[in-house]
Image (spheres, rainbow, N blue to C red):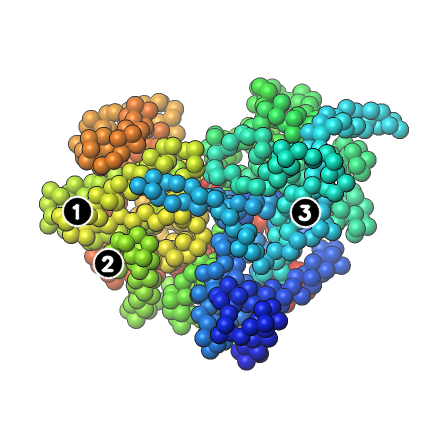
Amino acid sequence: MDKIEFKQTFIERLAELYAMEVSDATPIELYQTLGSIVSTTYTKQWSKSWQDYRDTKQKQVYYFSIEFLPGKMLKSNLLNMGWLEIVEEALSELGIKLDDLIEIEPDMALGNGGLGRLASCFMDSIASQSLPGNGNGIRYRYGLFKQRFVDGHQVELPDEWLPKGNIWEVRKDSKAVDVHFGGSVHLEEHHGRLKPVYHGGYTVRAVPYDTGMVGYKNGTVNTMRLWDVAIPAEEEEHYRSIEDRRMVEELTSVLYPDDSNEAGRKLRLSQEYFFVSAGVQSILRYYKNLHLPLEQISRYIAIHINDTHPAMCIAEFMRLLVDQENLKWEKAWRLTLQVMSYTNHTIMAEALEKWSIEMMQDVCPRIYQIIEEIDRRFVEEMSTFHNQGLIQRTRIIQDGQIHMAHLAILGSHSTNGVAKIHSDLLKNVILNDFYVLYPSRFNNKTNGIAQRRWSQLANPAMTKVLNQTIGDSWHRTPTDLHLLMNFTEDDEVLEQLAAAKLENKKRLAAYIKEHKGIEVSPEAIFDVQIKRLHAYKRQLMNLMHILKLYFELKNDPKRDIHPRVFIFGAKAAPSYHYAKAIIKAINETANLINHDPDIQDKIKVVFLENYNVSLAEKIIPAAEVSEQISLATKEASGTSNMKLMLNGALTIATLDGANIEIREAVGEENIVTFGLTEKEVYRYYQEQNYRSLEWYHNDPVIQRILNAFIDGTIPNIVNEGKQIFDSLIQYHDEFFVLRDFADYCRAQEIINQLYQDSRRWNQISLINIANAGIFSADNTVERYAEDIWQIRPNPSSQLGGAAQHD
Ligand code: H53
């Protein structure tokens, strides 16, 4: 479509939808009009993609995830359709700013953080690589809460995103399936086989809402299917009371706001079974319509379990094969192993799901029976194994609890971690018992990011410089960013990149001014820590370093430091009081420092509210320092580290998660690392000889800083300050903040020094961009496709499956 054609279509569509002319229409009407043109256009390709998959019987993967975090989709759809520039210009000729329309779209926030965002980055890349793949999840009516600060405290407001209208989804009543909950089940003999007989319980209807996942300029449109709940018409009489109806509606009402922490609640387990059962049933129905033998299902279908939340896929698949399709257990089990694969995203004990037997019996009794049988057969099969202690430790059911990670590993052919160090820890430490039993199941797939969203969409200024310098092959082949390495000594390019960064910093400065009323200088270093608030991520250490600089400047206002703006974005789980105490402490410190005339604007602290995908798109292009400071071993991978690197920020990092691979990619001189290593952390665990109190007593700097939390230096944090102080002293500083602090300050001083040499700084920035290509999710999903899912690009996609240049 060219510009003239688009303008014509736009005017016509606006008239059709609203009987209006451009000059009369509100931004919402204009947004709806544009969205309607976009979606009706890709719908043709959408049908073609799934018809292709069906007609040529291509193997497809289904990515089951309890969270998806796509953010806004208008601009990325335009980009992927190859329309962005034309539409922007055409609208502007009609007197409409595309950015104003983009503002209208609600940020689709059906996820908490890294896990959900990764799922959405994968959806983009799977489609962009012409791979036959679908998402399967829950259509929450309320996404992740909106965060506001009131007197520096986090307050949570509901995220009502649907009333504003979601133009991308298509409800498909004809594809609904029923999901049964509760009651009891007993087995009865039927023609020589045991068959389950259900008593009581209740049935709900799962109704899918499909959203097109548009691939990058390749004609592929895949499906993200999110399930909503409804009461089946024929079951109406069972749901007479308001209570009963509410119970059903609650199923897809809210996303649990905990990241890497399991609530262990019945509703959560019900949500898990709901989207698992709906998804697996609809896959099997699709497969049966292909009229292929059931025994061959693993040649056509792969199911991926994203973290343990969808691990019941294994038992549900067994249920359908055995109870419904009358397959023998052994055969069904073999197929299940071939179909299923699992990604582990954390080693943190509190995130590894366990459910009590009673609760699972209560929610899905037949699934419990099947898990019990899987467990029984595992123990039986392993009865001659020499190490029976190991078998007891790897069982699914232990001490009245069902270990979902054990189910996921024992019931699938592949378990992967999300960065090299994380996968190694799984093999050698956390899941070592399983690795001993099934070494070939374990593998690594380092995370990746939706490259185009985090560069072309979020950072047009940088994109322009890159296109002018190295052409645009990197849009499709992100490792071509490496061509930039030819320009490390090219002053013009270095300066152009620096100018792009400055432009982005000015934009962010304006946003900060508008939303926080804080004046920040675009000449200052923009230092960014954006991620969920969690003790292991150590936002507290960042705050302590800020306090250190503050006290130094108070003592010696002439102290030579380059002005720095410390920018935070982070939500805390509503019940995570410690994380909320840290938010309050950062906000109060910000208030203190930002208003202290002695500081002369040398440091500013800005905590932006409601960190989400859209805000990330504003912050990341302006960032110069990327704070990746988790305690080594605790951050499985991290993905903001990759996004910030791609945008030319220098990483200050512990040797944790993907930071290690970032260091390998850019070289030691282009990243600043510090802190305990994995080995050192484990040595402390073994020898149990970390005494945080000693680090407090022996280091006057630490003392001064920690005292500030309890002596009134930081105002209005009587309770929070004490809680923080106690966590470090009385409760022994679980994440070694005091141990790593001095080394962190040393690293920060290196950054301060490096920034004085702007040429060197610009080189580092360029080298980071140039080496970010390997962290593209395009690359990551290709590895999943080849090694785990065994799926191939659709041969009849417009690219013929092969990577081509624009
Ligand atoms: O998953 C990210 C990792 C990150 C890890 C995160 C994560 C969640 O967001 C939620 C639950 C969970 O178990 C792990 O913390 O390190 O980058 C994607 O893999």
SS class, disc 1: loop
At 55% from the left and 64% from the top, the residue drawn is 32
Comes first in the chain, label 1 or label 3? 3
Decide if residue 542 is in sight here. no
From the top left corner, tell me how far across and down residue 140 is, in percent. 57, 45
Which picture quadrant has residue 313?
top right
Q: Residues within 10 Å of mark 3 (few under 14, many from 20)?
A: many
Position of residue 218 measured from the top left corner of the image (x, y, whole percent): 60, 65
- Kindly indicate whether the residue at mark 2 contacts the one at mark 1 (C-beta within 8 angstroms): no
Quadrant location of the N terminus in the rendered image:
bottom right
User: Where is residue 636 shown, x and y percent of the image?
Assistant: 45, 40
Determine which of the numbered discs, if any, sits on residue 521 in the image: 2
Q: In the figure, 760 relative to 378: above or below? A: below
Amino acid at dot 1: Asp
Q: Which residue is mark 3?
A: 207
Determine whether 471 is above or below 288 in the image: below
From the viewer's perspective, tell me whether residue 125 is left or right of residue 711. Answer: right
Identify the residue at horizontal 62%, vertical 71% (top origin).
16
Q: Nearer the viewer, residue 85 or 638?
A: 85
Marked residue nearer the N-terminal end (3 or 2):
3
- Residue at the spot x=41%, y=33% of the render? 576
Circle 3: residue type: Val
Disc 1 versus disc 2: nearer the observer: 1
- Determine whether the residue tagged by mark 2 lies in a helix, strand or loop: loop
Residue 658 lies, in percent from the top left, at 43, 45
Q: What SS does tag 3 mark?
A: strand
